[in-house]
């Protein structure tokens, strides 16, 4: 498990990909760790403010080179994207090299471990900085043994109609809302961005497949003193590339409740245009049936990602989905998650 990362002053590298979905990691770190972010490194958007592009991060400058950030006294360069396959764009190497030479540590959530790169490792040792690969898995992950179900904590897992659709944000917002109600709640990070925000977790998409459910169990058992665990989901059960990690999390965490996340304007699976997104009713039925053999549970509510819709259209979509599913529906960023918490609350009694 990655140890907490503290006292950070972050420059986030997004080079040519700074938008809500292309730089999901960057946007989420800005949203939840705003006070730690001093600049965005992206020569294609240099001179603008972060909020002018992604709608958040007012006051964060976008610069073309690491040298422009030094007056802000940064401590680390954070890789701000999570591309398919998790590989480092070749043209980014120069930025990382410059950051290390200016004594910035590197924080990466890529599948390729930068700490194992010969050039970067040598430079990091020479300049006395750390390279933190948050996707590195701990060595002591057990096989799944149904231990999560035996804990006393309430486990809520976010699931999705697609990948990169708001599961992490929904999970964080549920944990925050529960805390405001005086509930001892924790967000459980299962992906690289969540780990960067929370400071701990396991990136389950980097775990050997036989041990994914064991990794989910481990996360639950180690946090079982909390009254509520809001567990970040991954992928979607119908995605041809990511369904395995979705199922491992579903069975390993043994949730008593699910929150289904969906983006209304997205019609096909991300990176797979030949695969239409299933109707929500079909997905609800599928997730509940797949969960049932290990831990019977219900979808308790719907979280919509209406980032590309004005508020009036988002409210209209919410009312439509409420009629279709007869479940509480919200957009966590636009309208909060109080109605989802109301649906979760009976499980806490």
Image: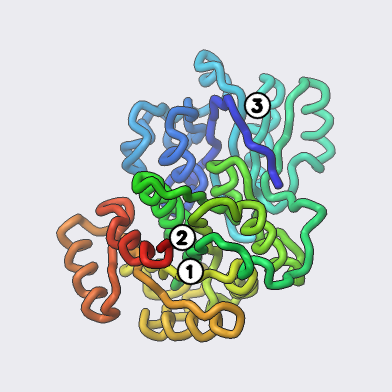
**Figure quadrant of residue 134:** top right
- For label 2, the crowd category at 10 Å Cα-Cα, with few meaning under 14, some 14 to 19 and many 20 or more, is many
Label 1: element kind: strand
Left/right of residue 124 with respect to residue 36 in the rendered view: right
Is residue 307 visible to us here?
Answer: no
Q: Label 3: which residue?
A: 99
Label 2: element kind: helix
Q: Label 1: which residue?
A: 159
Among the two numbered marks 3 and 1 on one chain, the one whose residue lies closer to the N terminus? 3
Q: Are marks 2 and 3 in contact (CB under 8 Å)?
A: no
Residue at image point 53% right, 42% down: 197
Q: Nearer the viewer, residue 226 or 234?
A: 226
> Disc 3 versus disc 1: distance between alpha carbons?
37 Å
Among the two numbered marks 1 and 2 on one chain, the one whose residue lies closer to the N terminus? 1
Among the two numbered marks 2 and 3 on one chain, the one whose residue lies closer to the N terminus? 3
Q: Nearer the viewer, residue 165 or 69?
A: 165
Label total for image: 3
Looking at the image, is 157 positioned above or below residue 307? Answer: below
**Horizontal and vertical percent for residue 338?**
29, 56
- For label 3, the crowd category at 10 Å Cα-Cα, with few meaning under 14, some 14 to 19 and many 20 or more, is many
> Disc 2 versus disc 3: distance between alpha carbons?
31 Å
Q: Label 2: which residue?
A: 167
**Figure quadrant of residue 204:** bottom right
Residue at image point 43% right, 85% down: 285
Looking at the image, is 104 positioned above or below residue 268? Answer: above
Q: Are marks 1 and 2 in contact (CB under 8 Å)?
A: yes
Label 3: element kind: helix
Looking at the image, is 86 positioned above or below residue 303? Answer: above
């Amino acid at each position: 498990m990655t140890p907490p990362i503290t006292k950070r002053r972050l420059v986030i590298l997004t080079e040519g990909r700074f938008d809500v979905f292309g730089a999901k990691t960057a946007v989420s770190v800005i949203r939840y760790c705003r006070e730690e972010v001093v600049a965005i490194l992206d020569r294609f958007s240099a001179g603008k403010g972060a909020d002018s592009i992604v709608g958040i991060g007012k006051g964060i400058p976008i610069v073309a080179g690491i040298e422009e950030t030094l007056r802000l006294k940064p401590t680390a360069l954070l890789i701000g994207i999570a591309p398919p396959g998790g590989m480092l764009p070749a043209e980014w190497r120069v930025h990382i090299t410059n950051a290390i030479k200016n004594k910035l540590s590197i924080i990466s959530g890529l599948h390729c471990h930068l700490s194992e790169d010969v050039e970067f490792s040598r430079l990091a040792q020479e300049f006395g900085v750390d390279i933190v690969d948050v996707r590195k898995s701990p060595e002591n992950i057990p096989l799944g043994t149904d231990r999560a179900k035996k804990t006393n904590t309430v486990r809520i897992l976010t699931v999705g109609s697609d990948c990169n659709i708001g599961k992490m944000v929904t999970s964080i917002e549920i944990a925050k809302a529960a805390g405001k109600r005086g509930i001892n709640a924790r967000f459980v990070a299962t992906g690289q961005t969540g780990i960067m925000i929370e400071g701990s977790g396991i990136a389950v998409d980097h775990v050997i497949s036989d041990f994914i459910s064991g990794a989910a169990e481990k996360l639950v058992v180690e946090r079982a003193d909390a009254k509520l665990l809001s567990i970040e989901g991954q992928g979607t059960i119908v995605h041809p590339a990511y369904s395995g990690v979705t199922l491992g999390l579903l069975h390993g965490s043994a949730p008593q409740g699910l929150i289904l996340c969906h983006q209304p304007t997205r019609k096909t699976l991300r990176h797979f245009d030949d695969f239409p997104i299933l109707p929500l009713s079909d997905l609800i039925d599928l997730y509940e049936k797949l969960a049932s053999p290990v831990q019977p549970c219900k979808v308790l509510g719907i979280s919509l990602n209406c980032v590309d819709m004005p508020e009036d259209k988002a409210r209209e979509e919410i009312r439509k989905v409420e009629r279709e599913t007869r479940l509480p529906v919200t957009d966590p960023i636009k309208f909060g998650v109080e109605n989802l918490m109301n649906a979760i609350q009976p499980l806490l009694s």
